[in-house]
Image: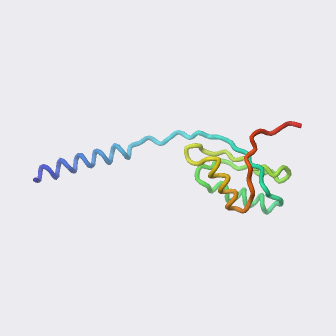
Amino acid sequence: MKHLKILFSIIFSTFVLLNCSEEPKEKIIEKVVFETSLHCEGCVNTISTKLPKTVGVEKVDVELETKLVTISFDKNSTSEVKLKKELEKLGYDAEKVDSLSNG
């Protein structure tokens, strides 16, 4: 019985160690642009200070004149859908901009 407990402990420890030794995923940085309902410097400040605290967010650029929010994020940690929801939680409408036209 004692040998069985020792064997079980060794197997369990090995299993735990193998599962915990997973290498961290490499960051996959992507950018998304949202057109938002922001309208003042207070809005810019709110988004600029609160959104970067979201898991996976690397950088946030907010442009008051165009009402655009550009977010660089780690695709392994978050998604465009989650980021849109975060902007909405802050009180802003947000629609993804697929492409910006030069004209």
Residue at (62% x, 52% y) in the render? 82
Quadrant location of the C terminus in the rendered image: top right
Which residue lies most toward the left here? 1
28 vs 97, left or right, is left
Q: Quadrant of residue 39?
A: bottom right
Q: Position of residue 18 (x, y in %)?
A: 34, 43
- Rendered image quadrant of residue 91: bottom right
- Left or right of 46 on screen, residue 7: left
- Is 102 positioned to the left or the right of 75 in the image? right
- Give x and y (percent) for residue 72: 67, 45
> What residue is drawn where x is 65% and y is 54%?
52
The residue closer to the viewer here, 50 or 89, is 89
Which residue is situated farthest in the right direction here?
A: 103
Residue at x 11%, y 53% (from the top left corner): 2
Residue at (75% x, 57% y) in the render: 93
Q: Is residue 15 left or right of residue 2?
A: right
Q: Is residue 5 above or below residue 100?
A: below
Q: How many marks?
A: 0
Residue 81 x %, y %? 64, 49
In the foreground, 101 or 22: 101
